[in-house]
């Protein structure tokens, strides 16, 4: 079964850090780009970051540049999102998604595989 499983969410105070993991099974991420999205109730899903597992290129939303770092460990078939200096406005459900299309073509409604999401809550 093709699957992505996120973990690592939780409650953290503003200024703190969390590391999210996105573990793939049923396929290898080597030829995929993996995106992180986040969503709060009543709002559209927002692209946060993306990593191309084939060449390691990365992309970030302006709102997280300098605070978040995305990386992939192809040996573990897992992608990580290190989130530092967290702010209350980072509170959301975070999803990872995989597709063979490059990061620049990742649109939420058109990606092959999605995880179930993990909740990140940042208190002020």
Image (cartoon, rainbow, N blue to C red):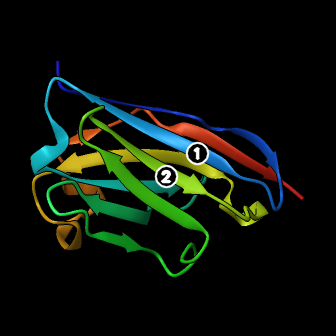
Which of these two is toward me, 15 or 4? Answer: 15
Q: Quadrant of the C terminus?
A: bottom right
Q: Residue at x 55, y 64 (%)?
A: 68
Above or below, 55 relative to 17? below
Q: Residue at x 61, y 70 (%)?
A: 67
Q: Would you say 9 lies left or right of 78 here? A: right
Q: Earlier in the sequence, mark 2 or mark 1?
A: 1
Residue linked to disc 2: 81
Q: Are marks 2 and 1 in contact (CB under 8 Å)?
A: yes
The location of residue 9, given as percent across then percent down, is: 62, 38
The location of residue 86, given as percent across then percent down, is: 72, 61
Q: Would you say 97 lies left or right of 30 here? A: right
What whole-number distance in Å separates the C-alpha atoms at marks 2 and 1?
Answer: 6 Å
Above or below, 73 relative to 50? above
| Mark 1 burial class by Cα count in 10 Å: few <14, some 14-19, many 20+ | some
Residue linked to disc 1: 19
Q: Residue at x 33, y 49 (%)?
A: 72
Asked which secondary structure carries label 2, the reply is: strand
Above or below, 57 relative to 79? below
As drawn, the residue found furthest toward the bottom would be 62
């Amino acid at each position: 079964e093709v699957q992505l499983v996120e973990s690592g969410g939780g409650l953290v105070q503003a200024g703190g850090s969390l590391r999210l993991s996105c573990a793939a099974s049923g396929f290898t991420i080597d030829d995929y780009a993996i995106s992180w999205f986040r969503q709060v109730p009543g709002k559209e899903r927002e692209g946060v970051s993306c990593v191309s597992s084939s060449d390691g290129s990365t992309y970030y939303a302006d709102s997280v540049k300098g605070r978040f770092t995305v990386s992939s460990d192809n040996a573990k078939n897992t992608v990580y999102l290190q989130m530092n200096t967290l702010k209350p406005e980072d509170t959301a459900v975070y999803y990872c998604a995989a597709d063979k299309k490059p990061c620049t073509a990742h649109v939420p409604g058109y990606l092959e595989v999605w995880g179930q999401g993990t909740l990140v809550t940042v208190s002020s």
